[in-house]
Structure formats: structure tokens, C-alpha cells
Image: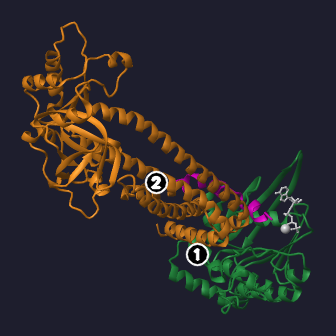
Amino acid sequence: MNRYWFELKEGVLFSLKAIKANKARSMLTTLGIVIGICSVALMATAIKGIDRAFEQGISALGADNLWIDKWPWFTDEEWWKIRNRRNLTMENYEKYKSLAKKPLAVAPTLWSSCKVQYNGHYIEDTLVTGSTADYVKTTNFDFAQGRFYSEIEADGARDVAVVGNDIVENLFKHINPLDQYIEVDRIKFKIVGVLKKQGSNLLGDFNPDKQVYIPIGASIKYYTGHRRSIAIVVRAKSTAQVKETAEEAEEMMRRARGLKYNQENDFSINQQEGLMRNYNQTVGVIKLVGLFITGLSLLVGAIGIMNIMFVSVKERTREIGIRKAIGAKKRTILSQFLAEAALICLIGGMIGLTLAIVLSMGINKFLPTSVQMDTVFLAITISILTGIISGFVPAYTAAKMDPVDALRYE
Amino acid sequence: MNIINIENITRLYEVGAEEVRALDGVSLAIGKNEYVAIMGPSGSGKSTLMNILGCLDTPSSGTYLFKNIQVSDMTDNQLAEIRNREIGFVFQTFNLLPRSDSLHNVELPLIYAGIPSSQRKEMAMNALVSVGLGDRVHHKPNELSGGQRQRVAIARALVTNPAIILADEPTGNLDSKTGEDIMTVFAEIHRQGNTIILVTHEEYIAEHANRIIRLRDGKIEKDEKNSHSHHAPLTKAAAMTGS
Ligand SMILES: Nc1ncnc2c1ncn2[C@@H]1O[C@H](COP(=O)(O)OP(=O)(O)OP(=O)(O)O)[C@@H](O)[C@H]1O
Ligand SMILES: [Mg+2]
């Protein structure tokens, strides 16, 4: 037992010597592994970040929600067919709301894109959502200040607004936004509530942080008129009831729309399950491609290691002969060179990992992520494995050298 | 009991279509505490024989008994262990690890023998002192003279207390004065009871041995006692006075 340990220790200490003796060469070789491991670690981190951002986005949308809409999120139907569907109206919404028993909350939504401004600061193309007081029940909103607009305010189509956190950060420097009047396409709305940061960047403009919420009556009155289709947000009582809520929604919407039994649905019931499926499909491909490409860079690094190990074995043929002559076994020589390859890769891996950690701090600005412990372990394991795999063939050629030939090598 | 018994050993090399008989039916027995010199013209098979005796190479045919054990039956690992424990090699070109100091070079066989570090260091120190290099422990080979390097190599060969020391032209790369110094070291090692086989081209070096074997064309031409050996071995001298 001791013996294996001594041999391994000798192998490691000696490979450190060999690495030191060829500093420039070792550094260049290691560079391949540094880049390989760094990109693998970054890719793993980025993938985690995208997943996390998406999950956050989904939960900001509300995990138990359905969206009844003229437009399906994903479809194989032809575009003109959907275009020709009748708009969803407030009447459809009222009818559905009165018929549906399953939902926890139902709210109509009407989107418009407006320029919002306050005191000279402005943001173009802000998503302004018009809805009812029940809308807040379909969300997981936390309020930094104030409240959502009330039923009375909504029914009266009052000029009140709830604003997302990014809007506040951009428009209100050092001013408490509550009870201030914000201009939405030149109409003044009183701010009654400010949301806490939701941080779902992947949703883009649909990120609640970037939105303004006003009563739907105000949306119709000022921005859209009656010609635009609304969408209906439905929240199920629990995740388990999403399916039955959707089934009920289909039936009740058909009734609300007065469809005959032989007519197709002229509306879509969208679920985030579809979003999830779609995400996994597209992002899954991106992940695979990303891992493949980073894998390639690691492979290039591994080939570099293999190459340099062959050179190292060749150069040290005589040393191998000497060691064999004084009693080194095949496995001794094998483990010595494997240790050397693994060590070079481990050093490269550590440097690559450090680099990845520094770089991921940059990524963290866009995606909620940092290098996780499991990525660290993964990177270290991969680098050692890379060393052992790419060092194996060179080490094996060293191990099976004939001692007499090796000693005679010039 | 003889340490080495070889019977009708041949070693063939295929060079292209030709066959070179480096050894051609060599039989030999070497007993404990013998001091044998092998001589012969260049290409006569001396190194080939030494490599086979040292278990670095295997014969094409014939039998080799090392301490009455069949060497041809041994696995690679067993051969490595024999080389490690029973055989001490000294080469013409020293063959030290260039990046390691004297101490580490001498320690190396002990590492492979699985001896713990502290004991290893002590044994290696003793071996270095015994060849007169107690003050060159932390010198690397390129910081030593040729004679000193060969002493380190001898210390490395001695440190495991092997059954036999094999030296292939150990003075070949040294001037005659330094060569003589090295021969005194071998004489001392022999006096302490070790068995030595040494290859040389120089008659005056061979004169140190008790027995001289002459090879020619892979065959033993002559195998005789060296009557004017400078020093009779201790054990034999003791045995003679005892009888
Ligand atoms: N690897 C080899 N392949 C082919 N022939 C070899 C090989 N090794 C040795 N020989 C041949 O075997 C013969 C004996 O070689 P060996 O090295 O034993 O001679 P030597 O007596 O040690 O010579 P020297 O005094 O020059 O060292 C030579 O003819 C040599 O050419
Ligand atoms: Mg020779």
C-alpha cells in the first residue's frame, strides 16, 4: 500500500519538476485547457442562468395562469385563419366570468405601447396594460409602495396607475413616485402603487418591472378604442387545477362566443406549459450546441496535452530506461506520466475556473447567475479526467518501453 | 549456492533480413562474493550478456537461474522487483536523473521498494558516505565531476543491498586516474562481501577482479582465475586461514 503512495508521490513531485523545467512549454499547453475549462464552466453557468431567468419569468407571469386570447402562442395553423378570428370583446369576458366556476380570478387585459414621462424624463414604447382590479389576483406582485387600483377606480376608468420598478428607477430620481402624476401619451395618471423588482428579464417588455398598469376603461378611452381584441387572464385555484380550469374555459368561452357544436374554436387558451415546452425545445438545442462547441475547445486542449505528453515521453526516454533499470514497474511509469498530464490539466483547469468566475461576474449583469459549487466540481473533475484520458496513450507508450532500448536512446 | 547460473544462452537480433547472434551458447555460474571481469573486443556481446544477467533483457533461448529461480518464468513485475532488490546497475554513462540531486538519485530504488521517507533518507545518506560523497548530497549531476557522478551511481546500485552489482564499463567515460579511484571503490565494495561483475576493455582494470571471462563473437573464449589479483576477498582469505 505504502508503495503505491510513494510511487505516486514521486510521480507527482517529479512531474512538478518537469513542468517547472519547461515553463514556457507547459504554459502554452495549459492555455488550451484554460480556455477549454473556462468556456465549459461559463457555458454551464450561462445555461443555469438562462434557466433561472426563465423560471423567474414564468413565476412572475403566474405559474397557474391561462391566457384566453385571439392569438395562440404556438400554433401550426395558418396566420390568415387566426387573423380572421373575431376579436375577443369585453362582453365575451363578462359572459365567461359569469359562467366560469373554476377560476380563482379572471381579468381582461388590453395592451398598448405608449411613451411614459415624468418631469422631462421619458421612456418610449412602454407596455401599458389595461385591466380590472382582479388583475392583481392573477399575479404574484409585491408592492414597494401603495396598492393596486381598486374596483371602483377600475370601473370608473379613473386615471390611476401602478408602475413597475424599472419605470420608477428611470423616471423618478430622488422623488417618491407615490401620488405623483405620470404622463402616458400625454394623459396624466396618478400613481397609486409601485411594484417591487420582479427581475424577470427574459420576458422582455412583458417583464412587470417595465410595465404600467391602468384601468382597462382608461386604455379603451385614451388609447385603443373598441376595435382591439382583449385577452383574458385566468388564474386556477392551484397548479393541479390548471387542466380542468382550461377545459372549463374552453367550454364556457364557446358558449360566450355563441359557437355551434360543429364550429371550430375561434380563440386560443394559452398556458405556460406550452411556453415551457417551447423553451425547452429551442433552448435545449442551444444548450446542446453550446456544450458541443465548448466541448470542442476542451478537445483541442486535450489534443494539445496529448501532443506535449508524447514529446515529454520521447524526451525522457532515457529517464524511463533508468527508472526501469532500478526497479520501476509498468504501472509506476504509467502513473507517473498520468499524474503529470492530470497535474498540467488540473493547473490549467484551476486557472480556467478562476477566469470563468471573474467573467461570470460580467454575465451576472444580464442573467441572475454565478459559478455554482457543482460547476466548480464539474470543472475540476473534467480537467483531471481530460488529463488522464489525453495522457493515457503517451503514458502507456512510456510504460511499455523496452528498458534496454530506452537506456540506449540518445 | 550460486547467485547466477546460465546455461547455453543465446540472444539473436534480427537486423533486416540478417540475424545477429549477439550471444551464442553462453554458460556461466557466478557464486557469492566473486569479482568477475568480462572482457572482449567491441561487439563481442558483453553488454548483451550484462543486460540479460541484469534482467533488463531476455535471452532468445537457454536457461537463466537467479538464486535458483527461473527468470524466464517471471512476469514483468517480478523482473522489476528483482532489478529493484537483487541487482545494482552501474553504467558507463552514469545514467543519473539530471534534475535530481545525489540524495534523490540514490533514494529512487528505495522509493520503488516502498521504504518510508525517513528511513530512505538515512539509507541513501549512508550509501553516499560509503562512496565518499557525504559532502555532495544536494548537488545535481551537472554540478559533479565525472568520477563523482559515477560514485553517486555506485551508491544508487548499493543502496538496496543487492545480491549482485553489474557494472558495464564503469570507467569507460573517465580518465585513468579517476578510473583507478572508482576501481578502489569497487574493491572496497567487494571486500565488504558483495558480488561484482564488471565489463572493461582495459587489462589494468580487469586486473582488479578475481576471475576474468573473455568473450569473442558471442561465445566464451576463456574463463580463468586471475592469479595476480591485487586483493584476495576477505571471506576467502578468512576461509583459507581457517582451513
Ligand atoms: N538492439 C540491437 N539490435 C541489433 N543488434 C544488436 C542490438 N544490440 C546489440 N546488437 C548486436 O549485438 C552484438 C553485441 O553487442 P554488444 O552491445 O553486446 O557488444 P559489446 O561487447 O558490449 O560491445 P562494446 O564493447 O562496443 O560495448 C553487436 O554485434 C551488436 O551489433
Ligand atoms: Mg557494450
* Residue A180 lies within the magenta run: no
Residue A253 is situated, as x and y percent measured from the top left of the image, at 16, 20
- Label 2 sits on a secondary structure element that is helix
Q: Where does ligand 2 appear, by image quarter?
A: bottom right
| Residue sitting farthest toward the top | A262
Query: For mark 1, what is the residue?
Result: B110
State how far apart marks 1 and 2 are (Cα).
Answer: 46 Å
The correct choice, above or below, for B219 with respect to A10 in the image is above
Using the rendered view, name the quadrant where residue B10 is placed.
Answer: bottom right
Q: Chain of mark 1?
A: B
Look at chain B in the picture and name its colour. Answer: green
Residue A171 is situated, as x and y percent measured from the top left of the image, at 30, 55
- Residue at left offset 14%, top offset 31%: A241
Question: Split into 4 quadrants, where in the image is the N terminus of chain B?
Answer: bottom right
- Residue at left offset 72%, top offset 81%: B141
Whether callout 1 and callout 2 share a subunit is answered no
The correct choice, above or below, for B3 with respect to A293 in the image is below
**Which of the chains is orange?**
A
Q: Is mark 2 within 8 Å of ligand 1?
A: no
Residue A292 is situated, as x and y percent measured from the top left of the image, at 52, 42
Image position of A388 (left or right of A159): right
User: Is the residue marked by circle 1 packed among few (<14), some (14-19), or many (20+) residues within 10 Å?
Assistant: many
Front residue of this view, candidates B167 and A333: A333
Residue A87 is situated, as x and y percent measured from the top left of the image, at 25, 21
The segment highlighted magenta reads A385-410
Query: For mark 2, what is the residue?
Result: A42
Q: Tell me which secondary structure the magenta stretch mostly adopts.
A: helix
User: Is the residue marked by circle 2 packed among few (<14), some (14-19), or many (20+) residues within 10 Å?
Assistant: many
Using the rendered view, name the quadrant where residue B81 is placed.
Answer: bottom right
Front residue of this view, candidates A12 and A383: A383
